[in-house]
Image: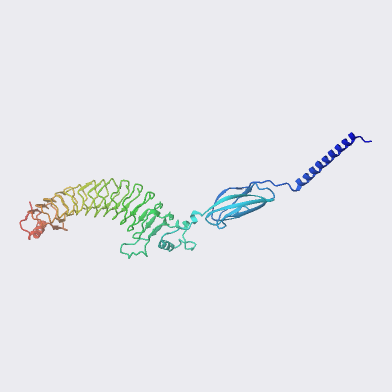
């Protein structure tokens, strides 16, 4: 008989064999499953680069990393008008921003990544936008400018133009239909050296600010209130006449040769840096005081019909013409002007004429309050018009070339000295009318004496002497 102890032992052994077989089968089952159905863990993917900048028409390759193999890969663009993508190849289509997005999918598990793409237009291919349709129309009429005939102008085309001239004269029948109101768009014409747009309706000069190659700029007759010329360092010819410009900084425009600010609202003007200046026109401004000194190339200045009360011109070796009439001048200083030939300063408040002007030929100073006039340092004086002043004596005895004299409406004039041993053939003396105190005229004997006596026959109390 099998004892109870043996029976228990056999039962335990059977359980152990069953458990061993069960473990063995489990291991075999799991091993078989791992060969074909290994579970997929979550994963991350990445695009390289994550940001990208392209120009229209360019392509680039974006690479994907981190995706398990094999996996289903899907590419898309968030805006296919801006960029398109295929297997990581990105093509830029138009200006804008879009995202390239990729999805990797395996066994129901997916991961996403994206790349931000900015598409820019090639600056040279950018279509220029013009605020004023007439300006665009006039530009498109320039032969060869619109090279592709698309009725647009791109920057690359604009750079072929060096000169634009759209100026009118004041009497040219100007209308709103044939004039510009804006120059917006011209800032892209960076190779311009000449721009003339006189008598239009332009209010802003901002588009001109960056035209660094300009040598000639004419904006006269436009309602412009301000202008920045600091970048226009090669500018030679500046015409801003009849604009509303009230301040003008020319410190950086050292190449200037011609400046015309006639009829502007300027109340001050600093010319000290303009050593190449040749011509200055500043008539009808609000400038009350001005010094023009040490300018070696200046030949002419026009300050007519202004508000000048004080004016100094010194060390101007080439100055030939100076026009100062119809101001409020009380103080006039002229030093070292060896080439000055024309001095016009009528209708002012001057009280004294005493200038060393060795080449002066034409002096026009009527309608002042002059009580002292010394012509002895003007040896080349040919014509002197100084009616309606307060001098008591006009002495031309050292002016051997004097031929044309106008001394009328002189309430204090007592004596005129014309005796200088040289009577010019082109004589014209207007020296008798409305000179109530005139009693003596000294002349050379001969032709001059005969001429003066003939002119004086209708005026009593005047002695003609030759001594």
Residue 24: image quadrant is: top right
| Residue 300 vertical placement versus 147 (above, below) | above
Where is residue 283? Give x, y as percent.
Answer: 26, 54
Q: As rendered, which of 219 and 97 lies closer to the eye? A: 97
Where is residue 147? Give x, y as percent.
Answer: 48, 61
Residue 223: image quadrant is: bottom left
Q: As rendered, which of 409 and 49 lies closer to the eye? A: 49
Q: As rendered, which of 195 and 310 lies closer to the eye? A: 310
Where is residue 49? Give x, y as percent.
Answer: 58, 48
The residue sitting at the right extreme is 1
Residue 451: image quadrant is: bottom left
Does residue 88 appear left or right of residue 279 in this picture? right
Where is residue 175? Give x, y as percent.
Answer: 34, 64
Does residue 385 appear left or right of residue 115 in this picture? left
Does residue 133 appear left or right of residue 331 in this picture? right
Q: As rendered, which of 418 and 306 lies closer to the eye? A: 306
């Amino acid at each position: 008989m099998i004892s109870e102890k043996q029976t228990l032992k056999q039962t335990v052994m059977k359980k152990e064999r069953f458990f061993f077989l069960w473990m063995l089968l489990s291991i075999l089952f799991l091993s078989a499953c791992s060969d074909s159905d290994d579970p997929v863990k979550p994963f991350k993917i990445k695009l390289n680069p994550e940001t990208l900048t392209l120009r229209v028409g360019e392509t680039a390759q974006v690479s994907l990393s981190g995706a398990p193999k094999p996996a289903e890969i899907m590419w898309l663009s968030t805006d296919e008008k801006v960029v398109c993508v295929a297997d990581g190849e990105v093509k830029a289509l138009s200006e804008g921003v879009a995202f390239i997005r990729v999805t990797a999918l395996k066994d129901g598990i997916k991961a996403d990544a994206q790349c931000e793409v900015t598409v820019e237009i090639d600056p040279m291919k950018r279509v220029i936008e013009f605020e004023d349709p007439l300006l665009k129309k006039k530009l498109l009429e320039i032969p060869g400018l619109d090279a592709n005939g698309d009725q647009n102008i791109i920057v690359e085309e604009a750079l072929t133009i060096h000169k634009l001239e759209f100026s009118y004269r004041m009497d040219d029948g100007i209308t709103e239909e044939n004039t510009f109101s804006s120059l917006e768009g011209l800032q892209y014409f960076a190779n311009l050296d000449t721009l003339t747009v006189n008598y239009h309706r332009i209010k802003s000069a901002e588009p001109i600010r960056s035209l660094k190659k300009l040598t000639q700029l004419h904006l006269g007759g436009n309602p412009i209130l301000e202008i920045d010329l600091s970048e226009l360092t090669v500018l030679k010819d500046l015409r801003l006449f009849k604009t509303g410009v009230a301040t003008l900084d020319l410190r950086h425009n050292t190449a200037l040769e011609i400046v015309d600010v006639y009829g502007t609202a300027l109340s001050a003007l600093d010319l000290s840096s303009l050593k190449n200046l040749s011509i200055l026109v500043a008539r009808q401004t609000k400038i009350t005081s001005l010094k023009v000194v040490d300018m070696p190339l200046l030949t002419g200045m026009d300050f007519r019909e202004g508000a000048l009360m004080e004016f100094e011109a010194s060390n101007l070796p080439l100055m030939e013409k100076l026009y100062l009439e119809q101001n409020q001048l009380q103080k006039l200083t002229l030093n070292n002007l060896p080439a000055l030939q024309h001095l016009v300063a009528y209708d002012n408040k001057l009280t004294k004429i005493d200038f060393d002007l060795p080449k002066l030929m034409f002096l026009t100073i009527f309608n002042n309050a002059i009580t002292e006039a010394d012509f002895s340092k003007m040896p080349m004086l040919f014509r002197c018009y100084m009616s309606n002043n307060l001098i008591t004596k006009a002495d031309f005895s050292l002016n051997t070339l004097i031929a044309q004299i106008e001394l009328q409406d002189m309430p204090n004039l007592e004596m005129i000295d014309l005796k200088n041993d040289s009577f010019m053939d082109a004589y014209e003396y207007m020296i008798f009318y409305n000179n109530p105190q005139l009693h003596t005229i000294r002349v050379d004997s001969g032709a001059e004496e005969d001429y003066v006596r003939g002119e004086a026959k209708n005026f009593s109390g005047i002695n003609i002497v030759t001594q």
